[in-house]
């Protein structure tokens, strides 16, 4: 966790429920975010650090130009959840 390789560490008996919670969060993401994330995660193992950062720098701005992003920013500014 200190290296940033995981988001949290949980006891064995809580692993499945926490994994389900993470999956439920992922399901609520905009479709383009999951569509973009899956291939990036699949390919990252074969990339150098610099290549991975370059891919992130390429993908991230595309997320800021979607209607989902505009809706989320609008909701945040209005004090609502998206």
Image (tube, rainbow, N blue to C red):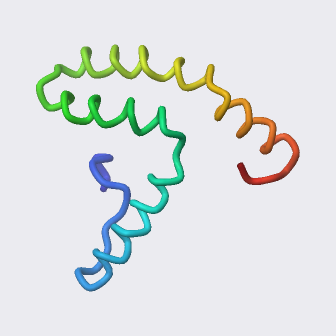
Closest to the observer, 6 or 68: 68
Q: Residue furthest right?
A: 78
State the image coordinates of residue 38 (x, y, percent, origin top left): 30, 37
Drawn side of residue 17 relative to residue 26, left or right: left
Drawn side of residue 45 relative to residue 59, left or right: left
Closest to the observer, 81 or 49: 81
Quadrant in the picture for residue 64: top right
Q: What is the count of numbered marks?
A: 0
Quadrant in the picture for residue 71: top right
State the residue at coordinates (11%, 25%).
46
Quadrant in the picture for residue 17: bottom left
Closest to the observer, 12 or 38: 38
| Quarter of the picture holding the N terminus | bottom left
Drawn side of residue 63 relative to residue 59, left or right: right
Closest to the observer, 2 or 21: 21
State the image coordinates of residue 22 (x, y, percent, origin top left): 41, 61
State the image coordinates of residue 77 (x, y, percent, origin top left): 84, 40
Q: Residue furthest left?
A: 46
State the residue at coordinates (26%, 15%).
50
Q: Residue furthest bottom?
A: 13
Q: Is residue 63 above or below residue 2?
A: above
State the image coordinates of residue 54 (x, y, percent, origin top left): 34, 14
State the residue at coordinates (81%, 37%).
74
């Amino acid at each position: 966790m200190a290296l940033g390789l995981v988001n949290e560490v949980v006891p064995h008996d809580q692993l499945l429920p926490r994994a389900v919670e993470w999956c439920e969060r992922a399901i609520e993401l905009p479709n383009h975010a999951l569509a973009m994330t899956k291939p990036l995660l699949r390919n990252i193992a074969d990339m150098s650090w610099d290549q991975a950062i370059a891919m992130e720098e390429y993908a991230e701005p595309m997320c800021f130009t979607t209607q989902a992003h505009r809706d989320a920013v609008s909701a945040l500014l209005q004090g609502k959840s998206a």
